Amino acid sequence: MLSRAPSLALLRSLQTSSICFRCARRLANSGQAATRPLTRNAQRYQGTIARDDSANKTFFWANAFRDGSKRNASGSEESQETALRSEGAKVEAQTVPLSAVADQQATASTEPPHRRRKRLKAASNALATGDTPLPPDASSILSRDAAAAPARSFRRALSVYLSLSKPRLAFLIVLTTTASYSIYPVPALLSTTATAAPSLSTLTLLYLTSGTFLTIASANTLNMLFEPQHDAKMSRTRNRPLVRGLVSKRAALLFALATGLVGTGMLWYGVNPTTAMLGAGNLALYAFAYTPLKRIHPVNTWVGAVVGAVPPLMGWCAAASQYSLTNASNATWSSIFSESKELLFTEQAIGGWLIAALLFAWQFPHFFALSHGVRNEYAGAGYKMLSSSNTAMATRVSLRYSLAMFPICAGLSYYQVTDPAFVATSGVVNAWMLREAVRFWRHQGERGSARALFWASVWQLPIVLVLAMVQKKGLWNRLIGGADAEPEDDELWDEDEEE
């Protein structure tokens, strides 16, 4: 603070023998010292720094402190920004800034200095521990693209409706359906009659993948339609189209109804009624059971795991429909029931149930590792997730279902779906995920264990499914035997006739 001239009232209150009145009158007639008004206006303060005014630093020591601290702060913050950019370049595909929201990034230049320092410090700690937040989902990215597109343009409409369908999630589910379709052990795979069967045709596969994608898009749209107010409270979902008002609820509902009806119809007439009923039932289970349960009880994760396990059953039934005699055009309820019993509850269906069990078990370590980093956001948004209510139990459940991968893969070989070597090859990949699940349980999700388990689960599932397709029972024997096989009697007879 600056010293001010003493007032005459104060001088008169002192003893007359302690001060010279001549000096007091001279001091009273002198001008008051210039004072510095105190203010809390941040804009004036920032404007003063930006102008870099040159004040008397020898007299007004606050200016020297302010300018010096400004240079030190800007230098340290620039060094932190440089370090973060270099670290972020190494993990560009895996990490994003802590804000992860476009609006915050746009206003970073006007961010108050103390908040900017706090954000940089938190981001530095996150990079050091490996607990950086996951990037926004595909729906949020597409929503930002739609917002940047011209109004009422085709690009904007396409981005909005793709965002409603959650294309990344839908594509992964279609892949599991296609993998199960491919793993089905068709007899005499390389023979002409087998490859010409309707269930193995390209058209059947097209109906299967398209119908599955549309039913999943319908379920995802209904999921967004029921909880936009909750999605607005989470950083990964606050940019979804219904939250940002890019599409009306009526348009989203019509899109969900259209995709659901068209997808179910394609599965019914292009594949078989059993696959269509599985797709429609899975749509209803996800939209009307799993979605409301998320705000009621942590058992929602188990219901969601059932939803993820149904698509492999759909692919298995699509491949097994070569044994079915039911025609969708003249199907009756009794014939549909007989077909479903034949495709789902016979010995040939065990492989499909095992692949469904593989998907069911995989979702627990995958989801609990994914949700661990945003467990507080789940709780703040009103979701009852096990990772936020009981982290210790979530880590134990992840470990148990990671162990379940071994007997499930062994069962595929035991029931003649894959070769015996599949037990060993899949065991290596399952052991990797089990190792990360043990670390996740031991460290309770801290020290980067949650992120390590998440990426292990991301790679484990496709590798195991590809191994199952490559090591399908009898595939290599047919390939090798077909190349070295002796000509059949019919072929020899044809050669004799030509001679």
Image: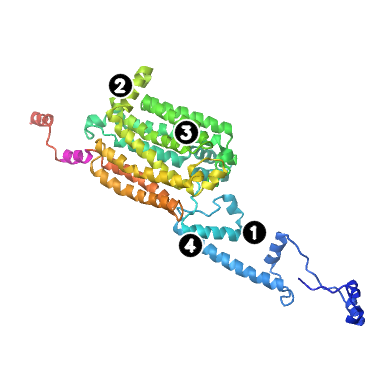
Mark-to-mark CA distance, 4 and 3: 41 Å
Location of residue 113 by image quarter: bottom right
The kind of residue on which mark 4 rests is: Ser
Could you tell me which residue is drawn at 59 percent across and 41 percent down? 244
Of the residues under marks 4 and 2, which one precedes in the sequence?
A: 4
Q: Nearer the viewer, residue 362 or 314?
A: 362
| Residue bounds of the magenta highlight | 474-483
Calculate the distance from the C-alpha at mark 2 to the C-alpha at mark 1: 71 Å
Residue occupied by mark 3: 286
Q: Is residue 107 above or below residue 152?
A: below
Instruction: Name which residue type carries label 1.
Output: Pro
Q: Which mark is residue 325?
A: 2
- Asked if the residues shown at circle 3 and circle 2 are in contact, with their CB atoms under 8 angstroms apart, the answer is no
Task: Choose the circle earlier in sequence order: 3 or 1.
Answer: 1
Residue that label 1 marks = 112
Task: Kindly report the distance in space between the C-alpha atoms of the residues bearing marks 3 and 2.
Answer: 31 Å
The CA span between labels 1 and 4 is 24 Å
Q: Which residue is mark 4?
A: 86
Q: Is residue 145 visible?
A: no
Question: What distance separates the C-alpha of mark 3 from that of mark 1?
Answer: 43 Å
Which numbered disc, 1 or 4, marks the residue closer to the eye? 1
Image position of 271 (left or right of 232)? left
Label 2: how many Cα within 10 Å (few below 14, some 14–19, many 20+): few
Amino acid tagged 3: Tyr
Does the residue at mark 1 contact the one at mark 4 (Cβ under 8 Å)? Answer: no
